[in-house]
Image: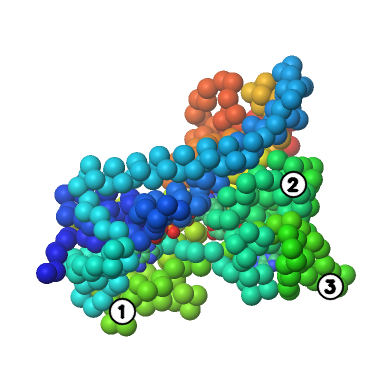
């Protein structure tokens, strides 16, 4: 017998579970289907983000940062940390505990909000009919007025470096190492390569990152990217740009990678190799030929600005559609879609999506970069503030980086905010709010910030746009 719902959400990653819970809050009869099972074979919600993405990687980043701080920086502030050691299996077990408790929390939230959950594979046919194959092999047929696809993404694999399960791994494998590899190779200097490279570098691996592009972090403001490259070099992360990996061979417990750079073909041996060359949309076994849902040329589900697919009443959100593959972008799309289904009229501002790379220093930005403004011919003013001039950063003995604001030359409206430094993953929210509210740099300058805080750096950068910063020498000054 077909079961009828107002909304069926396929996928319980951040995009899907936000959609399902918000739909239930709005009084819609909502179902959510997910096929993920954990190592023990139990169904589990939270998708990539909670199980093998944002949360576990941040757990390892936080632990390894505490370790390296204790090892290298505590002495300078009078803390003795003799006999310091890292217990890798305990670090991994702590990360697994966090994942378990958060994913159980999502299951609890679904239940308490009245979302009906199904554990298995969803297959979408014509007329918003969804066939579910449950993990025990039984099937159910569901139908809804609206369907939200949130099936996410998976790692890209490259033929030159097939995963071996132990020596050559993707990001998921790199979250499970039980010991510190002596030499660690990473293919790709994107967010994953830099974050996981940082984790194992801090714990003692000799890390070499092989990146095909000539430019480092091309999506970030290039002044920030240059500072990041300088800091990673200081940390002895060996990032090699313009390096194309062409092959690999595993012998015993070592992998030899073949690559070409400006000087020609080279080989390099590693104990472990992480392939971090991007992620691709995941739609395997999802769409019946008559579903009416089209894919674009890159395999993403084709949607309009409101996340509606070509099939009436079928929406798609998160990593499986265009736009940055970021958990918060998927969450907000999921919420926007179900609120529109419920008759509300929210819109998502794709120009105000924050990006963060959780290395140390952290890198964060929102809006346009300086190189984008230059190439579009926009005239703008720049205000920046070095963290070395922040009292709070000095007190914390962590003064790396700067905050930079780009504002329209005529209207003073903030066009972009770029940061590198400690805790900028938190500070960027202030830039996002300012941009979302259409603020001018002057508005931020007129706002009172608590002292002493790192966020005063944003205040000073805003004042610097018109030459009024107090704690730095201003190059130009307007009254
Ligand atoms: P997913 O999280 O991939 O979830 C999709 C869900 O759909 C899965 O649970 C899957 O089982 C289910 N599914 C798929 N097909 C079907 C089907 N046919 N039937 C039933 N269920 C199905 N982003 C950030 O914003 N910040 C970070 O710090 C960050 N760190 C990351 C670190 C790593 C190592 C990785 C790999 C990613 C990271 N990301 C980060 C990216 C983030 O994880 C993704 O953007 C986010 O998970 C996408 O959410 P989603 O809901 O669209 O898809
Ligand atoms: P990415 O696309 O950000 O970076 C992949 C890098 O690999 C690129 O710089 C690319 O030029 C390089 N590359 C591709 N093929 C190569 C080859 N054959 N040889 C050498 N280099 C090659 O992808 P990612 O780092 O794998 O991350 C995947 C997705 O997950 C991204 O969309 C990212 O936004 C998301 N993510 C976000 C965060 C965060 O928000 N902090 C953290 C991790 C992942």
Q: Nearer the viewer, residue 445 or 252?
A: 252
Q: Nearer the viewer, residue 389 or 112?
A: 112
Q: Is residue 162 left or right of residue 343?
A: right
Q: Position of residue 246 (x, y in %)?
A: 73, 73
Between marks 3 and 2 in the image, the one whose residue lies nearer the viewer: 2
Q: On screen, 257 above or below 464? A: below
Any part of residue 374 in sight? no
At x 63%, y 70%, the residue is 162
Residue 265, disc: 3
Q: CA distance from mark 3 to mark 2?
A: 24 Å
Q: Residues within 10 Å of mark 1 (few under 14, many from 20)?
A: some
| Residue under pointer 1 | 288
Quarter for ligand 1?
A: bottom left
At x 23%, y 57%, the residue is 31
Q: Position of residue 82 (x, y in %)?
A: 75, 22
Of the two numbered discs 3 and 2 on the same chain, state the one appearing first in sequence.
2
**Coloration of the structure image:** rainbow
Of the two numbered discs 1 and 3 on the same chain, state the one appearing first in sequence.
3
Q: Which residue ends up furthest to the right in the rendered image?
A: 263
Residue 205, disc: 2
Of the two numbered discs 2 and 1 on the same chain, state the one appearing first in sequence.
2
- State the SS at label 3: strand
Tell me whether circle 3 and circle 2 mark residues in contact (CB < 8 Å): no
- State the SS at label 1: loop
């Amino acid at each position: 017998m077909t079961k009828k719902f107002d909304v069926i959400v396929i996928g319980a990653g951040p995009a899907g579970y936000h959609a399902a819970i918000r739909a239930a809050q709005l009084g819609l009869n909502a179902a959510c289907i997910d096929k993920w099972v954990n190592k023990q074979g139990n169904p589990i919600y939270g998708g990539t983000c909670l199980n093998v993405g944002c949360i576990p990687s941040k757990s390892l980043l936080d632990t390894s940062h505490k370790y390296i701080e204790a090892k290298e920086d505590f002495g300078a502030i009078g803390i003795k940390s003799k006999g310091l050691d890292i217990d890798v299996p305990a670090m991994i077990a702590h990360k697994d505990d966090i994942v378990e408790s958060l994913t159980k929390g999502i299951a609890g939230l679904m239940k308490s909000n009245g979302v009906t959950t199904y554990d298995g594979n969803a297959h979408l046919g014509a007329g918003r009919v969804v066939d579910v194959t449950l993990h025990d092999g039984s099937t159910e047929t569901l139908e809804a007025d609206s369907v939200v696809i949130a099936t996410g993404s998976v790692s890209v694999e490259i033929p030159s470096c097939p995963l071996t399960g132990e020596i050559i791994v993707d990001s998921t494998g790199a979250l499970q190492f039980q010991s510190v590899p002596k030499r660690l190779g990473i293919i790709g200097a994107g967010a994953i390569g830099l974050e996981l490279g940082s984790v194992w570098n801090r714990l003692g691996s000799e890390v070499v990152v092989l990146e095909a592009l000539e430019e480092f972090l091309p999506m970030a403001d290039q002044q920030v990217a240059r500072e990041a490259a300088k800091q990673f070099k200081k940390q002895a992360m060996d990032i090699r740009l313009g390096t194309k990996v062409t092959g690999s061979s595993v012998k015993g417990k070592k992998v030899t990678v073949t690559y070409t750079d400006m000087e020609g073909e080279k080989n390099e041996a590693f104990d472990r190799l992480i392939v971090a060359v991007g992620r691709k949309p995941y739609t395997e076994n999802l769409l019946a030929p008559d579903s009416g849902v089209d894919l674009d040329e890159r395999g993403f589900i084709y949607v309009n600005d409101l996340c509606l697919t070509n099939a009436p009443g079928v929406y798609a959100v998160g990593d499986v559609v265009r736009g940055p593959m970021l958990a918060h972008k998927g969450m907000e799309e999921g919420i926007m879609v179900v609120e529109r289904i419920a008759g509300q009229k929210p819109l998502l501002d794709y120009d105000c999506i924050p990006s963060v790379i959780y290395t140390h220093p952290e890198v964060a930005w929102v809006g346009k970069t300086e190189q984008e403004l230059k190439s579009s011919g926009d005239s703008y003013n720049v205000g920046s503030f070095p963290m070395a001039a922040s009292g709070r950063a000095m007190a914390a003995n962590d003064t790396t980086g700067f905050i930079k604001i780009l504002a329209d030359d005529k209207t003073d409206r903030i066009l972009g905010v770029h940061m590198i430094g400690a805790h900028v993953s938190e500070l960027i929210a202030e830039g996002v709010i300012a941009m979302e509210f259409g603020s001018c740099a002057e508005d931020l300058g007129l706002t009172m910030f608590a002292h002493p805080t790192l966020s005063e750096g944003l205040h000073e950068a805003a004042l610097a746009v018109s030459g009024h910063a107090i704690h730095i020498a201003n190059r130009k000054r307007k009254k």
